[in-house]
Image: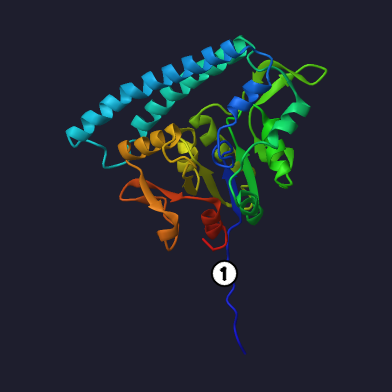
Amino acid sequence: MSRHRTIFRRPILLCVDFDETITVHDTTSLLFQLSSSSASTQQQLVTQYVDEVGEFIGSYETKWRQRELTSSRSRTFDDAGLHEFLEGYAAVDLRSVQRVVECRALEGIRHQDLVKVASSVQVRSNYAETLALADDWKIISVNWNKKLVESVITQAGVVHEPTQIIANDMKADQQGVTTGEINVKVQSPMDKARWIDNVRSMYAATKPTVVYVGDSATDLLALLAADVGIWIAAANTAASSAKLLHQLVENYGIDLHPLMNCGSVGGRIHNDRPVLYTVTDWAQVQSILKSPF
């Protein structure tokens, strides 16, 4: 008589970012293109945001260079330092969002235009198949328009419930045209981490393994809050979002392990440092979903 050993596997709850994780490029510019605001207003908003972010990061880069020269870069995880940076980074972003709302820069967008433009959004290969492998999944995104996110994944054949997409949304008038106001649910790295905790609580009965996949600094706290955090490389490896995330990992004591070189992903901490796993594409993410934890 042969005996078959049953390998128990906890269900997998896959949480993922949207812009530059599912998509190849950020989709914010598409929302501006669809709005009725002037090109000069949009350019002024973008320029001010880029300048403020650059100034903020630049002040930290000076500190990081000094640490490197004095060999005082953190050998253990500097949680307080990381949170200080990300809170300041989020404050710069929030001021930008407030300016966008105040000048109604995203006014005049119709639902049918969102559906139409979604067909032009380039997505990464294999992401839809990867979502299908998980026991359940959520998208947690700072994107300003949930309907755009829904339209993009629907056109890729991803069947979903409205509750599976956690994102911001634009308020609309009775004709369904956006007013320029944004209902903010997810704006900062701290918000994303809180949503990881929230969805973990929602699934407390089944105790799933929470896997988070993201590409930028805004994802970092969610990557650390998940049971398994996976950093998916930007399609453009020179992108500022990828550069900043790498700087944070290096300067605040976080280990990176290529997922395909790891026999298992059971450990979140190594030598008192959190561990994140790196992949280059969604096909590599699938490997973790096909194996028991």
Q: Position of residue 82 (x, y in %)?
A: 37, 32
Q: Quadrant of residue 217?
A: top left
- Please give left or right for residue 284 compared with residue 169 in the image: left
Q: Is residue 150 visible?
A: no
**Above or below 120: residue 280:** below
Residue at 39%, 21% (x, y): give it. Answer: 54
**Above or below 5: residue 137:** above
- Please give left or right for residue 229 compared with residue 207 in the image: left
Disc 1, SS = loop
**Above or below 218: residue 126:** below
Q: Is residue 196 visible?
A: yes
Q: Quadrant of residue 160?
A: top right
Give the amino acid at mark 1: Ile
Residue at 70%, 45% (x, y): give it. Answer: 156
Q: Position of residue 260 (x, y in %)?
A: 44, 59
Q: Which residue is mark 1?
A: 7
Residue at 54%, 63% (x, y): give it. Answer: 292
Q: Position of residue 80 (x, y in %)?
A: 35, 31
Q: Position of residue 184 (x, y in %)?
A: 62, 23
| Quadrant (top left/top right/bottom left/bottom right) for the N terminus | bottom right
